[in-house]
Image: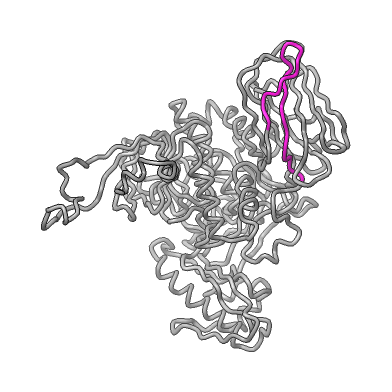
Amino acid sequence: MKRRNFFKTGAKGALAAGLFPIMGDITAQTSSSSDKRLFNWNEGVEGIKGDPIRRKILNVDVAVIGGGMSGISAAVSAARNGAKVVLVQDRPVLGGNASSEMRVTVNGVQSLSNKHKVERETGIVEELLIENWHYNPQESYPVWDHVLYNYVVREKNLTLLLNTSAISVEMNDDKIKSVVCRQLTTETDFTINAAMFCDCSGDGFMAASAGAEFRMGREGKAEFNEKYAPDEPDGWVMGDCFMMITKDMGKPVPFYPPEYAIPFDAETAFKDKHRKVKQVKEGFWWVELSSDVDIIGERDEIRHRLMAHFYGVWDHIKNSGNFPEAENIALDWIGSIPGRRESRRFMGDYILKEGDLLGNTQFDDAIAFGGWSLDEHCPGGIENLKEPASYFHSRFKEVYQVPFRCLYSKNISNLLFAGRNVSVTHMALSSTRIIGTCSMMGQAAGTAAAMCAEKGVNPRGLYQNNMNELQEQLLRDDSYFPNRPANDPKDKAKKAATIFASSTASGDAKLLLDGVSRDEIEKIHHWQSEGLNEELQLEWNKPQKLTSVEMKFDTNLQRKMMMHKNPEKNKGQIIGIPPELIKNLSVEARVKGDWVEVGKVDYNKTRLVKVNFNEVKTTAVRVKLKETHGAESIKMFEIRCY
């Protein structure tokens, strides 16, 4: 059977074709029956010459360049908010630094200096982490890649292009008109026309090609009055690094370093407490290299030298005799692509500074939060052993806000960004670069891009005229930023005459309407039942037309839940769906005096639960909360009705 006929016939063919969703409007730019360049020589065409590149046009609302965790969050959030989206990733897998190719842990706010040691991010990044434990309790990084893939391709309105790199940009004054992206695996150039563009690629080739203003290197102390900055500005950026995984062979295993390995100066290195070898399982973050000239242009040279230093360190561990615990240990996986911490930082209408983080500046355009310490790695990395591997300048007592003005370009009118390339100083980046924080910024950028495309405005105009609407949508979609309660005027739950529950062990059902969907330090915002099979009810004095009920439940945000290269670091975590999370529930509406079930959820896996149904006119809604994934009571933080 010919391949095309196979995909046209049978259930298996329908399924296979469905694995490759194309939601944007794609048209061939130069293909026709007379185009001989693509013919097979067996079809009678001899001596074929010319341009082998296929060309297609893709028309979307939002183009997201870069499929790391911030790009995934941007693309999914834009698609969920109604935009046609294309996500372009230059690798065969999604996840960026967090993928199986690099294996950087999806860290977030987990080092506050108060009793809340963890203050986990919610929204899309939390959905992904929970889903990973559902599908991947074996803690496999290659399986994690496929969890991310499934999460993206099942999203309606979203087209995914893997193995695809931006190669050129066409401008119309200060606006990006289109970006040309080449997919090497298919020898195809996609011309992507979009209203809004998001560069979440880290290095930011597309944004730089468009002429977006950026910085690289360290600001001096005087420019922004940053006490931890160097006295004078320079070109240093934080370095790239490799990860590894080892295997216990149960017997002594020799190690023979490659010829290019660089001997490790352990005596000098180990004078710094942060360069200690505390384990031989997952690699050492301090084996890193940076540049004070051009970390992007030097990447391949840096990769080679970094591998040489890595093997020098491992040679010392295996063959110096100082680490007997490594005798039976062999290398099982070593990264071939360095994970990157810093390169270009694109300038927005605001530059987030060290003082904003330390002083916890409050912004009227807050869209995310952070709280990782000011963790500035030393210039030169492993080639500068006289300085500490990282300075760990300061830890925070509470999370800080990230403003929306850091997520869009000051001089390219339809360009947003998210991740490590946003508008921050070098010192602020030492905290904001953490993947959990970058993912929250991605969700904000994607939501904003969808709104801009719908309204026909640019991001600056959205900030000036629609900032409250953007914040309300982010809060509705389970994002969070401190000191900004939700107050959505479309939420009819807030207009309820009363709300009550069948039992209360802590908190109060009324707190579900206070606009804060998590407990804060010394402030509770929850209702908790005494047991399972409980009910929650809202009553209105006048009939309401409803089509959805949205709720946020407990996933224990004070407990870590990320996957590690070293499973020993998972101690204290739950390898699975959080037991506190609601598992089964149903929603009923009182219609003409009778209770009618309008929706239910079985085997829930998300903190944010949306139950959609055909419109009903009702004076009361009742939620029957049946069981959790293991906890003996039900904790809830919010209920909304639309």
| Pick the front one: 233 or 35 | 35
- Residue 16 located left or right of residue 4: right
Res. 423 in view:
no
Rendered position, 203 above or below 270: above
Rendered position, 187 above or below 376: above
- Residue 207 located left or right of residue 594: left
| Pick the front one: 390 or 151 | 151
Residue 527 in the image: x percent, y percent? 81, 34
Residue 44 in the image: x percent, y percent? 12, 53
Q: Magenta segment, principal secondary structure?
A: strand
Is residue 599 one of those drawn in magenta?
A: yes
Segment colored magenta: 580-600
Identify which residue is drawn at 78% across, 52% down: 114
Q: Residue 402, located in which quarter of the rendered image?
A: top right
- Residue 404 located left or right of residue 633: left
Rendered position, 192 above or below 187: above
Rendered position, 215 above or below 259: above
